Amino acid sequence: MVAAESKPGGSRGRPAPVTRGLTLAHCSPFVPPEWVVAHGFRPVWLRPSRPAAWSRRAVCPFAASVLDAVVSGSPADLVVLTTACDQMRHAADVLEQRRAPVFLLNLPSTRQTPTARAIYGEELMRLGRLLVRLGGRSPGPGELAQEMARFDEARASLLAARGDLPAAVFARASIDVRTDAGTRVPPRPDPRVDAAGPRGRVTALALAGGPVLDEDLGLLEWVESAGGRFVLDASEWGEGTLPRPFDRERSDGWPLVELVDAYLGSIPDVFSRPNDAFHEYFRREIRARDVRGVVVLRRLWCDLWHAEIDRLRSAEVPVLDLVVDPIEDRLSGATLGRLEALLESLG
């Protein structure tokens, strides 16, 4: 149990390097990079694209694209998927049948209770034991606290620059900072360049919905060139799924307890039940950032986000339910027409 963690004793210096380049591939905000790096592995974010060979394997296109990324990409020593989505659970079964090195992390659906946090902590320790068996190391609490401080600082630097970064640039950086604590904040755009584009004005928008894939970035760039500005990224891989800042005193004293609380206890995930925390976060940030419209980037096959559309509209700003199909062009005339109509309606 997490509560049984012992007090730290161990060096606060940098841990000895692992003898070979061990990698752990995943695409979940609930796989803490601090934990992975402290065990001697390098986290690699899976970057799915349009599915090909796996599209006929009875999984949704996004899960199929994850399978494609695992099978056709650079081999990893371990792939970690979570139980947040039934389709991803099935994807883990498919990989296991192929004897791929896969770990299914049990993510509690109810996350507000001490029992849920204890389960999540046990899952992290179970993952840690596997990493040690695969050639990693068992870190001391001081080593874990050091990695937590490094990643915490990297996330803080990125969030401090959030308001100056275009949506596509921030989307890339928010993934990079989950894999490398040495990630540098992207340079700010030249202030002499008119960020409002040809319209000569900026309309504050929020982004919600499923993960923003590389093939979606062109759509975000088009919106911002047409006069929109995504001031909030509440998508599954957006800023809302970065953990809260760590409490340094708790990190030094009980690092795993603090890690569990910062991830499971603070990330407002739409998959949790109940998911009131996500909607409270969404409405609060909508008001705080003076958002005038919302674009929900929804995958055609994702019933969960479809079910949340009406509740997202409770934020009392116009909501565009933008369904993207894995086969269709993101920048099709119909899609751009709907986006342009939203911007026109917001004046």
Image: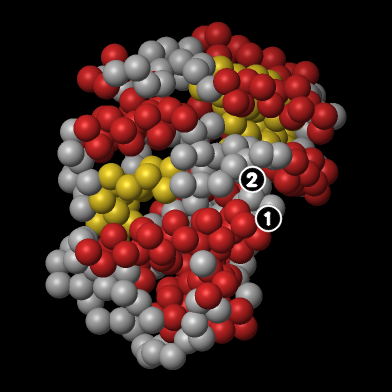
Disc on res. 110: 2
Image coordinates of residue 268 in percent, x first then y, are 65, 47
Disc on res. 222: none
Q: Is disc 2 placed on a helix, strand or loop? A: loop
Seen in the image, is 248 located left or right of residue 144?
A: right
Residue 99 seen by the camera: yes
Position of 178 relative to 172 (above/below)? below
- Residue drawn at 33 percent across, 25 percent down: 64
The image quarter containing residue 292 is top right
Disc on res. 113: 1
- Dot 2: few (<14), some (14–19), or many (≥20) neighbours within 10 Å? some
Residue 339 seen by the camera: no
Seen in the image, is 60 located left or right of residue 199?
A: left
Position of 232 relative to 179 (above/below)? above
Image coordinates of residue 1 in percent, x first then y, are 51, 67
Seen in the image, is 73 located left or right of residue 103?
A: left
Image coordinates of residue 84 in percent, x first then y, are 51, 39
Give the quarter of the figure containing the C terminus: top right
What is the three-letter code of the residue carrying label 2?
Thr
Position of 318 relative to 327 (above/below)? below
